[in-house]
Image (cartoon, rainbow, N blue to C red):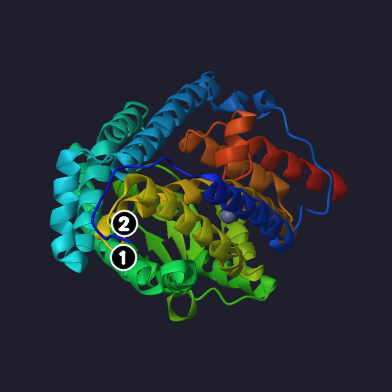
Amino acid sequence: MTSASGPRRSLNARAPVAAALAAVAVAFFVGWATGPGSPPIEFDRADAAAYFEHSGPNTLDTAERYRSRSRAIGLFALASEIALLAFLAFYRGPPMRRLLDRASLRPYRGAAAIGALLAVTLALAGLPASLLSFDLGRDYGLITQTPGGWAGDKLLSLGFSVLLFSIAALVAFAAWRRFRGRFWVAASLIAMAFAVIWLWLWPIAVSPLFNRFEPLPPGPVRSEVLDLADRAGVDVGEVYSVDASRRSVALNAYVHGIGSSKRMVIYDNALETLPPDRLSALIAHELAHVESKDLYRGLGFAVLVIPLAALALQLGAAAISRRNADRADGPSIVLPLALGLAVMSLLISVPANRLSREIEIRADYRALELTDDPGAMIGLQRRIAVSNLSDPDPPALWQALFGTHPATLDRFGLAEAWRREHPE
Ligand SMILES: [Zn+2]
């Protein structure tokens, strides 16, 4: 076998496609087996009009318009990303050959440079969609950030991804060279280790680069968090407020981190504008995630799904590399690996989102048990839908593919069912 590049061959995609489909099927099964299950009461999707009539006559139309444009931009962004990665993985015209031959001279340095190139070209390809999305958000009053602040954020994340992509490309190339047919085993172990470290490090090392976090001072909200946590029998770690208002008017809260980085974070927008009963509903929902160990559920899903997905990735990258007649030992493998990673992540996100929707509606149910206040839950979801301009009833196909949370109307439906089952 020669290590130099030769003439192109045809692409044999049978094995990678079969492995990718098997990985998706396994992911659906794992999601079904590890999920918390549907809430133990029957509920129907509520009717939107009844809930939004007091929020102003155009609320639903505005949200619908904003979200349909935002979905179009999202699809455009996804298509640009995949198109760019496919071009880089398959195009082997003379300029690309020269570039890859040059990278092969010092292959490890070359792999890192290809990683940096990927980060920069992806940022450039994503720029039009990113600008459109920023502009749309400003038009609808959802985004409050100035263009300067936005550009600063973009530069910061670009610097961050150049660093991250270079390291990832270097590690992937080293594993490819060293482990060959067992690349997928090494890649799985690395991905799992990375997931754990990321979960631990993200809240303490990454998010503070973009926002200010402050421990919630003693007061009614902190007491309510501790009180609800006590009722649920969970340890929340530290409770922070975050200055989300510097970018957006969106309302939210989340739990993140493991071990020493474990925390609940509440958006300052929510702390400042939500009445106490709705804030309690929000906090109870987040506590339900802690109680049901949903972060670990996500981690478990990843551990069980990653190996087969990594095998599909390996087979796909090898098939593209053979088709291109790339140097067998060269850092050019980083390019088909990047395309394969993007495609596999997209495919696996469908079953992962299905699991996420189940986890979210189940957390709503537990929050209702903790607060016994369906009115506050409905008020909270309505308020979130209005201020985040969410479409309370997104298209079914979009929701099935990309929805990480249940549709607002399903969440209303659950709260109504709870009210029916628990009359005062
Ligand atoms: Zn949630």
Q: In this view of the protein, which residue sits in the foreground, 343 or 368?
A: 343
Earlier in the chain: of badge 2 and badge 1, it is 1
For mark 2, what is the residue?
Answer: 334
Question: Could you tell me how many numbered marks the image carries?
Answer: 2
At label 1, counting other C-alpha atoms closer than 10 Å, the crowd grade (few under 14, some 14-19, many 20 or more) is many
Residue drawn at the location 55% of the way across and 31% of the way down: 391
At label 2, counting other C-alpha atoms closer than 10 Å, the crowd grade (few under 14, some 14-19, many 20 or more) is many
Q: Is residue 201 left or right of residue 278?
A: left
Residues at discs 2 and 1 in contact (Cβ within 8 Å): yes
Q: Where is residue 128? Give x, y as percent.
A: 27, 31
Q: Is residue 311 left or right of residue 326?
A: right
Residue drawn at the location 58% of the way across and 39% of the way down: 401
Q: Where is residue 74? Give x, y as percent.
A: 42, 34
The image quadrant of residue 4 is: bottom left
**How many angstroms separate mark 2 from mark 1 (CA)?**
6 Å
Q: In this view of the protein, which residue sits in the foreground, 270 or 126?
A: 126
For mark 1, what is the residue?
Answer: 173
Residue drawn at the location 80% of the way across and 43% of the way down: 417
The image quadrant of residue 283 is: bottom right
Q: Is residue 228 left or right of residue 365?
A: left
- For ligand 1, give the image quadrant: bottom right
Q: Where is residue 215? Give x, y as percent.
A: 39, 70
Most extreme residue toward the front, as rendered? 1
Residue 224 appears in the figure = yes
Q: In this view of the protein, which residue sits in the foreground, 51 or 309?
A: 309
Q: Where is residue 413? Give x, y as percent.
A: 74, 39
Secondary structure beneath label 1: helix
